[in-house]
Amino acid sequence: MRKFLSALFKKISEMLEKEEPTTEIHGQEEPEESVRLTNIKEEKNSKQEDGKQDTEDSKELLRSLILPQQIPPKGPARDIMNLMDSPFLALSKNRKKPIVYESQDGTRKTIVSCHSNHYIASIYDWDIIVFVAGKIQETLNNMTDIPPRTIIIPRHEILKALHKHNVNTQQKELEKSLHRLKRTAIDTTICNEDGRYKSDFGFIDSWEYTERKDKKEMKITLSQWLYDLICTKGALLKVDNDYFELTSGLKKFLYRTARKCVGYQESWEISLKTLYEKSGSEQEFRNFKSDLKAAVFDDDLPEYTVKWVIKGKQTSIIFRRRLKTDEIDRLIEEFELTNAMEKLSHHHSSN
């Protein structure tokens, strides 16, 4: 990143140091003193304005190159912190093999399975829950009422929020996702310490789609377990709007893991083996490693950069938060100050 910023600053420095074109006057008498002073003042003001514009252009250049995906979110989106770094979801859309996971300390156990002739709910299907959790958070923030377990949402609103643009095709995909969310069975120790739930509860209890002449809406009833998780104070984390643009299940998993585990740290490191276990992937380890390398090379996750690190015989993945706009501005100000001091030093030395 340091080399990248240095190269950018050098480019911007060249932009700022462009000399103003001079105009020579031949065959004319020197203007009167008052006119000459006025011209000098106007020229100085013009250069100041041009300098300000160059600076603003430089800042925009930096922001556009370093923060290409920083787009204001179009709507609320929240994920459930307790489920973000544990394998509750398939990374592919057609998994039938159960997910069996136990944390290294033995405190978190999860078995996820599907009903016969169906697939396990995937990380793509989970986008619906992320959207619904955001709607519930809105109610909680407004303190107007206890949020209902059954949410009614206009179809166009949910499709737009999930970045689904082909209505006819995406309507069918939406229904398939809801089928899988309902028919996925979960047995876990997470928020189930007293054993109230058995393996026959899923993510949602039911769903309906109503289409009339003046109304097209989805009705989704969350399972009690999931509803309790969402409504727990401090249980939800904001999700970047660009998360919905990710088309890779592995990249969605990497973003959710980083979002949960990096927190307020500048970076967070995890071994490749542990990351593989947390993914719940049904791939062989070597295939998972190959796909992960490709994802790290792309390095296009919202909010976070990903780095592949080898220390001796151990391979790790390091997640870092991307630079925010205020950090960019601070670096630009430091660059401008250094540039000004160099120009001043050059001016004194030339005199």
Image (cartoon, grey):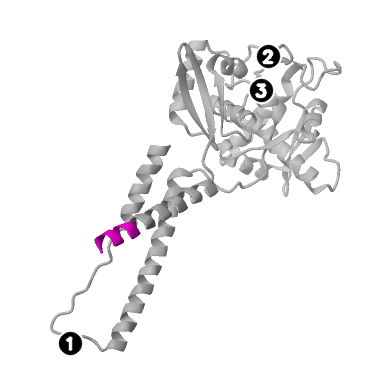
Kind of residue sitting beneath label 1: Glu
Of label 1 and label 3, which has the lower sequence position?
Answer: 1
State the residue position of label 2. 103
| Residue 312 sits in quarter | top left
Q: Which residues are magenta?
A: 343-351
Instruction: Give the camera-side residue of 54 and 203.
Output: 54
When the figure is inspected, residue 135 is found, relative to residue 296, above or below; the finding is below
Q: Find residue 105 and report its image quarter.
A: top right
> In x, y percent, where is residue 197?
83, 18
Mark 1 vs mark 3: in front: 1
Horizontal and vertical percent position of residue 260:
64, 30
297 or 322: nearer the viewer: 322
Residue at position x 58%, y 48% from top? 72
Q: Residue 48: x, y in percent?
A: 39, 68
Quarter containing the C terminus:
bottom left
Image coordinates of residue 106 in percent, x first then y, are 72, 11
In the rendered image, the vertical position of residue 267 relative to residue 311, given as above or below? below
> Which residue is identified by label 3?
121
Q: Amino acid at mark 3?
A: Ala
| Label 1 – label 3 distance at C-alpha | 85 Å
Residue of label 1: 29
Depth-wise, is mark 2 or mark 1 nearer the camera? 1
